[in-house]
Amino acid sequence: MSSQVPMKDRALSPDRIARIGREMQAACPGFDAASFTAQVSADLPRLELKARIARTAEGLHQHLTVTGPAALDTLLCSLPPTPEAAGADSDFGLYIYAPHSAYVAAHHLHPDHLDRSFAALAALTPYFSAEDAVRTFLTAYPQQTLAVAATWAAASDHRVRRLASEALRPHLPWSVGAGLPVDTALPLLDILYADSSRFVTTSVANHLRDIARTLPDLVLATLTRWRTEGRATDAELAFITREALKSRLKDGWAPAYALTGYDPQAAVSVSPLRLAHTEYRLGDGLAFEADLTAPADTPVHVMYVLTRTEPGTRAAEKVAHLTRATIRAGIPLNLAKTHRLKSAGTAALAPGNYHLALQVNGRRYPPTLFLITNGQT
């Protein structure tokens, strides 16, 4: 199954390198597609994804027979007529075109043709989102990059509008830091939050979530201001607000709950958590239940928290969404969930003692104890 193939092999395989070579040769007959494919493909097995992108970009540079703006023109001429014709089935594009923007960032930072480089990145981003490449320009030429991002925010293509937000995120994943104040792009977000494309507004929400790491009150004020402006639908603003405050909601920050419509001081009673067992193995399903009651109809945003409590180890928490619902007056709201005890990535689990607790409207309720033992089921 394709899901079992590592991402790096699905993104940039020898077949895809060969396709890049053919497309480049069609645009530039002097481009030696066979040599490019052989040299780059030979290096792929030892490289992770970002290194594969960089190696392919370097291969483009080594085999192009033109330089400067002419090379940028050739690169763009090599693209299929549309992202859809290239095979893109999402707004994000295809990884096969990630090396193209990486090539622009690596070899076209010259101040004499920045405008041409920026135009190339805007043209490339519908084929593969170019925010990582933009970061190189943001570091070298911050004012020029901020200025062009303002024009991208008004572009007709929603994927270019999204680039204006995504490329300037304070904590863009898998990319270098911006080195600018975290609220630098707020004027652009003021334009983009009412965009008609969810691809764009998702980036706006993620950008705000980055800002909220250090300036949560600014994010709260911004979201409150947007609500008064009447430019975005209530549903879209609710989406942006939830996503922007996601980390703060996990932290139990009361103002985040209040803004999203959940009273942190609501009179909610939570029954003790009921677990099927008190001992589990890695790979088991942790099934739990609880009942919530309230004297009046009460909207609740419920999360659950796994905390390792092994003596001598640093306490590590995993906070996960459980439900958003309304408790009807005097009628218990039954909650049930099975959480798979998998050990992976940042949510790695190790054998030991754990607490499981519910967090309702930001308030943490008494936990129950369970044990994870070694071994997969």
Image: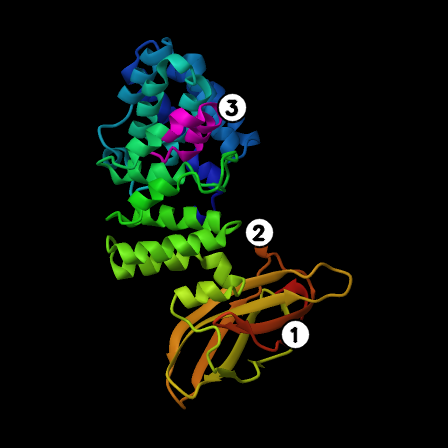
Element marked by disc 3: helix
In the image, 288 versus 118, the foreground residue is 118
Give the CA separation, mark 2 to mark 3. 29 Å
Q: Quarter of the image holding residue 73?
A: top left
Residue beneath disc 2: 345
Q: Is residue 162 above or below residue 351?
A: above
Q: Tell me the number on the disc at residue 370.
A: 1
Residue 76 point in image, percent of width and height: 29, 22
Residue 293 point in image, percent of width and height: 45, 86
Residue at x-position 47% and y-position 19%: 58
The answer to whether any part of residue 267 appears in the image is yes
Q: Quarter of the image holding residue 23?
A: top left
Whether the residues at callouts 2 and 1 have beta carbons within 8 Å, the answer is no
In the image, 231 versus 355, the foreground residue is 231
Residue at x-position 43% and y-position 52%: 219
The answer to whether any part of residue 90 appears in the image is no
Please give left or right for residue 376 compared with residue 204 in the image. right
